[in-house]
């Protein structure tokens, strides 16, 4: 089981950019599919982006073309680069992991706050 720690959140103006990172501890990081989710106040947690162990990526329609997920297996880290940020992107961003044979994410980070001001 990996343990996840996010970093890099903060305050940014609308239209700006921000990157968040997620460092994983434990073995076999390269065998995990990784994802980013977010939860805004009063809303349910929603999917943002995912990257498979082979590097394939998927994105929520709301962030497609603006956000980029990537991973560095040598550093046991997954990244989320966020461009053209909008106030509606304000949320706590969570990193998640699942072993590639599983269907559900079963490891979660503590979250990092991203706030986009208008």
Image (cartoon, rainbow, N blue to C red):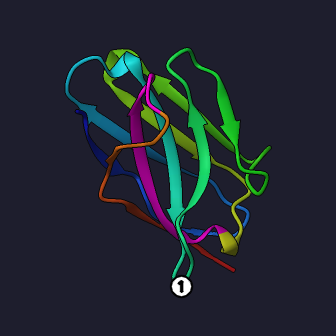
In the picture provided, is 90 more to the left or to the right than 61? left
Q: Quadrant of residue 88?
A: bottom right
The relative height of residue 3 versus residue 88 in the rendered view (above or below) is: above
User: Is residue 90 in the magenta section?
Assistant: yes
Residue 9 place in picture, x, y as percent: 43, 59
- SS label for mark 1: loop
Quadrant location of the N terminus? top left
Residue 103 place in picture, x, y as percent: 49, 35
94 and 10: which one is in front?
Answer: 94
Question: Could you tell me which residue is drawn at 55 percent across and 72 percent down?
Answer: 44
Q: Quadrant of residue 25?
A: top left
Quadrant location of the C terminus? bottom right
In the picture provided, is 46 more to the left or to the right than 102? right
Residues in magenta? 89-102
In the picture provided, is 62 more to the left or to the right than 89? right
Question: Could you tell me which residue is drawn at 64 percent across and 67 percent down?
Answer: 89
Mark 1 crowdedness (10 Å alpha carbons): few <14, some 14-19, many ≥20: few
12 and 36: which one is in front?
Answer: 36
Which residue is disc 1 drawn over?
Answer: 42
Residue 83 place in picture, x, y as percent: 69, 51
Question: Could you tell me which residue is drawn at 50 percent across and 41 percent down?
Answer: 35
């Amino acid at each position: 089981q990996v343990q996840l720690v996010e970093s890099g959140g903060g305050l940014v103006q609308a239209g700006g950019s921000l990157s968040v990172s997620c460092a994983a501890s434990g073995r076999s990081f390269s065998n995990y599919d990784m994802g980013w989710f977010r939860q805004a106040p009063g809303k349910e947690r929603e999917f943002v982006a995912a990257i498979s162990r082979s590097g394939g990526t998927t994105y929520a329609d709301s962030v497609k073309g603006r956000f980029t997920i990537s991973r560095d297996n040598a550093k046991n880290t997954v990244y989320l680069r966020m461009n053209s940020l909008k106030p509606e992107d304000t949320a706590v961003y969570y990193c998640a992991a699942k072993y590639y044979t599983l269907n559900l994410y079963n490891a979660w980070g503590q979250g990092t706050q991203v706030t986009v001001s208008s």
